[in-house]
Structures are given as structure tokens and as C-alpha cells.
Amino acid sequence: MDKELRNRDIRYCVERSVFHETELGGSTPQPTNSGRAIFNAAKNKLRCSRSAAKSLLFKFIPILQWLPHYPVKEWLLGDIVSGVSVGILQLPQGLAYALLAAVPPVFGLYSSFFPVFVYSFFGTSRHVSVGSFAVVSIMVGNVAESLVTNDNFTLPGNDSIIDMDARDKARVEVVAALTLLVGIFQIILGLVQFGFVVTYLSEPLVRGYTTAATIHVTVSQLKHIFGLPLSEKSQPLSLIYSLISLFRRIHNTNIGTLVVSTIALLCLIAVKEVNQKWQSKLPMPIPIELVVLVISTGVSYGINLHEQYGIGIVGNIPTGLLAPTVPKTDLFFQVVGNAFAIAVVGYTITISLAKIFSMKHGYKVDSNQELIALGLSNLTGSFFHCFAVTSSMSRSLVQESTGGNTQIAGTISSLIILVIILKAGELFTALPKAILSVIVIANLKGMYKQFMDIPALWRTNKCDLLIWIVTFLSTICLNLDIGLGVSVIFGLLTITFRTQLPQYSVLGQVFDTDIYRDLSGNAMTKEVAGIKIFHTSSSIYFANAELYAKTLKAKVGVNIDILIEKKKKAVMKRKRCLQKVMTLAKKILSNTQRGSGLEFLVNKEAIVGGLRTLSETIPNLPTLQSLGLERLSFHSLILDFAAVGFIDTVGIKMLKNIFEEFKEIEVDVYLVNCPGDILRQLQSSRFFNETFTPALIFPTIHDAVSYLSQTHESSSLQEVTAI
């Protein structure tokens, strides 16, 4: 019978899962209650699995979530205008930043198409414009120039002529391998939820680093502006060496190149000022970079600037897309350190801009998904010979200010670049390289404004100013990769120093409130009678535990160590006096034994009575008052742990010593605002015992003060009554 019911339940579950209920009619056998429950549980589990898979898919590919609900009428026009504006801006910047990355200009166009298109599908920010950026490009270029130097590509028999084609091909291979590794690092960090790595790069550090990188970018472009053939340097102090080399050859400046650069730079700066001043009145910024690009190319082609005046030009720009190839993985070992640095810096720039726009427009960005999106963009781009990309501040501002609402604007801008790659690339063959360098420098104006951080940080936080300056100087002197490492280490050291040297204070009560503030410099606070409240602004661990105890003893206004030493000496002195009395009593008794019996009994009773009276006047535990020492002005010490995030074993031992030492001088110690983790750590470390119990812990300062004040008042009344 059980077998028949089980078979009927199985048939019911199978048929209900294959056919719709209306298709089965009455042919479906009626199941038992257990069979129906099994089927419903399986159906709910399947529904949950589908929901989880759908949620995971939407999280990994955000475009699937927002595209079906895209408000075409409200947003499409703005995205089109924004995409066209960004695409127009991305063309000259892509060509220009390719020079920073030490690759031919056409690879800047590739880097403005493939990564941007990929990010549109996987990014969570609606307004950042991904693509080439000066800081990341110069970091890529430093790696390429250090591994592929000009000296290795001189023609046989003539060391002054360099095989440019072979050198550029080798650099492209290095850059592609570097970009692939950057993408892998970013994807891995995103998958393991390591988006918080950016927290180790504080804002002063990032701004100091990018300011120093701006100096590197500017100096690297001076050779194109002055028309001087200078060798690239990537070792520490390379910036200094480059400037020395430039000034030594300044007399060989190509006047034609300098004139073209000066005119273009003045035009760019002037129109950019107009764009900024009339931003609210212009429907879109004047695309001055594109205008300068087109005019300079036309003039160069018409006058033949290259042949007539020796002005360097971009040269051949092939049309069409290159076939995808796998980067050389054998180069990974040589670029792994730089790849990680570029991955972190690129992500930091992107997530900083993404958070700014998300807060302004009221939506959320997923920091880990941004890592994955940026990693996929770089990973995909590496197979098409792109260099590492990140978000650009100037393009992102244009995308947001011209009405961009989603990454459809980014897709449109990338399609504009695709059209140029396929059809119009060869039109810029006669473009002077100096124009690209000028475009780079003109777009660094906002970065140079970061020097204004120095007076601002001087007024607000001198420790952050120190981080800014050390980061700037180390990046200037030690180059971008080593400078970043030194900056991060220094930033972490400042955290250690801050916790080693925290702010300590004695708190007082604000009149007629339950609020407690620092007594020093606050006229509204008063010290609670008989109670000291000690506060620290940091966690307690091996590096500052001794300082905590030392400062506490100094802040309470009494030299605890000397007082304990005096007490020990007074106790020892009393013991010696008692021993002398006992010895004297024994002598008297021995002498009186020789006399009459009646005299002996009388003396014995007198001596025993005197010793009994003396023992009654001496307490079992000698107090400061009984020892003739001055009694302290406070009876309780409250340790405020509100700002203590953690405490290690050294800190716990120090805390127990504080409890014991103050107990010696008749002061009870209490803990307040103690976090749950620290309480559990104290319990697991066997901090509490019969003397120091959990009853010494209070949730707030005011609770402890109220309890201690009432307890002390009642004990004082009992003493008065007893007297």
C-alpha cells in the first residue's frame, strides 16, 4: 500500500512539472498530503533559484536591468547630444594620450572605442566617461619606455637612426600585456569584494599623486612642443634628468613647432575659459580641441609644414580595425608590479568620479561591480592593442553637463570613434604632434588647480598636508610607480603615528545636562566631585598602551607610582614597629616571670590588653589615612572607551595593571561606552575576577556618574552616623 501511494505521488509530481494544470484535466492521480508538500517545496526552491540567478545576472550586467525601463522620450535626446559631445572630445584626447602611453596615435582611437563600449554594459555609473586619461597613460608610457628603449632599435652602422616601426611594435606588445594584467587584477579584486582597497588611498594622497603625475605629463610633452629629439627616461629622478636634457638642447628648438604650439595653446586656453564662464548659456561646450585638430591638420597639409619647417607630424594612421590577438603572457613577470599600481590608481579615479555623480543625481554605484566593469573593459581592450583606461574628469563633466543620463551616451561616443577608425583616420596623417601635446597640457588646467590644496590643508589638517607633500615629492623624485608605493606606505605610517599619539582628555559635565566634554578650554563644563573621567581618541594596542597608562597617571594630577611607593614604605614601617612592640612585650614578660606571681599576672594582663587595643586600631588592610598619608581628592576613575575600536593583549594587561594600581590607592576604576567586541575580548582574556567584576562596566558616562555619586553620598552619611 505504501509503495502504491509513493508511486502515485511520484507520478503527480512528474506530470504537474511537465504539463500545465489545465492540460491534465482529471487524469492526474490525487496525491497524498506529503506528495503535494514535496511538489510545492520543489517548486518554491526552483522559483528561488531562478530569482537568485536573475538577480545575479542583473548585478553582473546592469544594462539588462535599466535598459528595459529606459524612458526614451525623456532621456534619449540628452544621451544623443551628450554622446556626440563626448565623442568629439574623445577624438583629440585619444590621439593625444596615445603619445603619453608611448604608442602610435591610432592606438589611442582603439582605446577610445573598445573599452568604452564594454563599460556601457557592465558599469553602474550613469555619467562617467571611460577612456584614455593623462595620469594612467603616462604610467603606461613609463613602463613601455623603460622596457623598450630607443637604444635597442638603432639601425646597424648608424646609432643616430632608430627603427621606429620595430620599436613601436615592441611597445604595443608590452602595453597590451600590461593592459591585460591590469584588467585581470581589477576583475579578481572585484570578484573577491575588494573594492575597499581604495580606502588605503586617501584623498590627499590621490590628489598629491595626480598633481605630481600632471608635472610628469607636462614635462614629457615639452619635447614635442619645442621640437627637440630627447631620449625617454624612466628611472628615479627621470623628471630632473629630462629637464636638464631639455635645457641643454633648448638652443636647437624648432621655431616653427614652437610657434604652432603657442598659437594652439592660447586658442585652447581662451576658448576653454569661455566654455567655463558661459557654461549655463551654451547648449554644449565649444569643441575647441576638434576645431584646433581640424584646422592644424588642414594648414599642415596645405603648407606642408613637415617638409618646409621640419615640424613633426603624426604620420600614417591606418584605417580599419586590427584583428584581435592574445597579448604575450611571458611579459607578465616584468610588468606585474606596475600593472597592480595602474589597476588601483585607475579604479580610484573612476570610483571617485562615480560617487560624485551618484550623490548629485541620487543613485547608487556598486564599487565592486565598477572594478569588474573596468577590468572587463581593459581585458577586452588588451586583445585589440588598447592601453589601460579609466574615467576622465573633463569628459565626464561634459557627459553630465550636456544632458547625459545613462551609458547610452558612452555607447554613442564610442560609435563615433568607430566611424573615425573605419573611415576618417587617414585624414589626420598631416596632424602636427605638437598639437596633440598642446591638447594634453591644456586639459591639465584643472589638475594644476590642486596646488590650492596646500593652503586649504594647512588651515584644516596639517597631517593630511604632510601626506600630500610627501606624495607629491616622492612621485616627482622617484617616478610614478615607486612614488605611489612610498606614498601608500607613508600614509599607513601616519595612521600608526596617529594611533600612537592620540588625543587624551579629562572630561567634565556640561551644566545641568548628561553631556560630558573636555575640561580644557570649555567654560561650560565642570569636574564631577570625587570622580575623574578619562577619554582617549584611539584604540589601545601595543604601540600606545604604555603612553595611555602614563598619560592617565599624569592627567589625574597625582603621582600614582610615588604614592604607592610611600604606602608600601609606611606598611613596612608599621610592621617593623609591631615587631619591636612584640619583642619588647616578650622581654617585659620574661622579666616579670622572675618576680612574684601576682605581679606577673598583673603585667601580663596589661601587656595583652595593650596589644589587643593596638591591633583593634590597626585595620587588616591599611588605608592611606591610617598610614598617615594624604587621601586623594577623588574616589572613582571612569575610563571612557567610546572611541576605542579594539584592544590587544598588551592593552588588556596594561588595563589590568591600572585597575590594580588604583585599587592600591583606594580608587575604584570603571569602564563606560565599552563596545561589545572589547567586552567579549576582556571575558575571553579572563580579565574579570572576584575583585574586578563586570559590575564595573556601565553603558554611558552619565549612568556611571549617577550611580557613583549616589553610592558615595550614602556611604558618607553612614560614616557620619557611625561617628
Image (cartoon, helix red, strand yellow):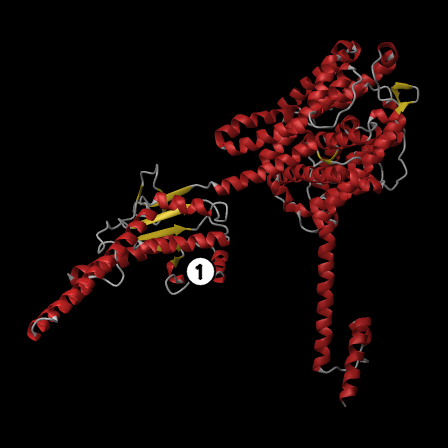
Q: Which residue is mark 1?
A: 687
Q: Is residue 599 left or right of residue 281?
A: left
Residue closer to the observer: 568 or 470? 568
In the figure, residue 614 lies in which quadrant? bottom left
Residue 360 in picture, x, y percent from top left? 60, 38
Crowd tier of the residue under label 1, counting other residues whose Cα lies within 10 Å: few below 14, some 14–19, many 20 or above: some
- Residue 249 seen: yes
Q: Nearer the viewer, residue 193 or 650?
A: 650
- Please tell me whether mark 1 sits on a helix, a strand or a loop: loop
Quick one: which residue is furthest to the bottom in this view?
A: 1
Q: Quadrant of residue 341?
A: top right
Q: Position of residue 449 (x, y in %)?
A: 61, 25
Give the residue displayed 47% in from the left and 40% down from the top: 501
Query: Residue reaching furthest front?
Result: 594
In which quadrant of the rendered image does the C terminus lie? bottom left
Using the image, determine if residue 546 lies above or below residue 294.
Answer: below
- In depth, the one of 381 and 695 nearer the eye is 695
Residue 566, percent from left and from top: 28, 50
Q: Residue at x 75, y 37 (%)?
A: 410
Relative vertical location of residue 96 with respect to residue 698 in this rendering, above or below: above
Q: How many marks?
A: 1
Residue 226 percent location from the top left of the image: 76, 14
Image height check: is 714 above or below 261?
Answer: below
Vertical arrangement, residue 568 with respect to residue 431, above or below: below
Based on the displayed image, in which of its 4 quarters is residue 448 positioned? top right
- Residue lying furthest right: 157
Note whether residue 386 is visible.
Answer: no
216 left or right of 586?
right
Quadrant of the snapshot with the N terminus: bottom right
